[in-house]
Image (spheres, rainbow, N blue to C red):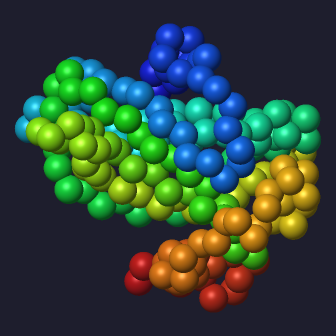
Amino acid sequence: MIFRTLWHQLFVGGRASRVALGDMTRSRFRVWPTDLDILRHMNNGKYLSIMDVARFDLIKRNGAWDVFTQEGWYAVVVGQTISYRKSLNPWQRFWVESRLLGFDDQAVYIEQRFVRPNAERRPEVYARAIVRGRILRRTGGVVPVSELIEKTGANTDEMQVPEEILEWGRSTRLPSTRDSAVSSWS
């Protein structure tokens, strides 16, 4: 995916305009032959990889990347869910809409949608994903959400994560390694 990320930054989205932290970005893509599975449509795993590229575009354009670089932070995905409506086929153009939904006590929530124009030239959602991410320090440890909000200047009044998404986040958390309640497969 490093080639696709570089291609996107250098030739596709590298000169896109800045946006506010809670604004939506549109990252343009095309289905490449290397994205296909045996059924000749975009492989479901490629959606997740392309979401990575689009999230990088989002954090570059909304200024979070500058804060991450200055502070020595990086983002990791701790959970994600995706629903598919239609297949993306070879050479089709599409875009990924990405936006920061908000925060809970531990994480950041991002919505991402794969979109193409329909026959009437209106945008149609082909897939939708919710991503739950944490911000880590390169020196070790987790960045508290309160510090993330302070350093990025996020306006939490304007960013509210829907309750059903917060519930999904709570229900899919894995126990901490400090937790003695980690179960085995047996």
Image position of 167 with respect to 87: above or below: below
Q: Position of residue 156 (x, y in %)?
A: 76, 67
Give residue 154's position: percent from left, percent from top: 80, 57
- Seen at 62% across and 48% down, the residue is 23
| Most distant residue in the top direction | 11
Is residue 74 rendered to the left or right of residue 52? right
Residue 105, position in %: x, y? 75, 75
What residue is rendered at 48% in x and 36% in y?
A: 26
- Residue at the image point whose x is 47% and y is 32% from the top: 27
Q: Classify residue 20 as left or right of residue 39.
A: right
In x, y percent, where is residue 58? 61, 39
Name the image quarter holding residue 142.
bottom right
**Residue at image coords 16%, 32%:** 89
- Whether residue 175 is situated above or below residue 120 in the rendered picture: below
Q: Nearer the viewer, residue 75 or 123?
A: 123
Camera sees residue 175? yes
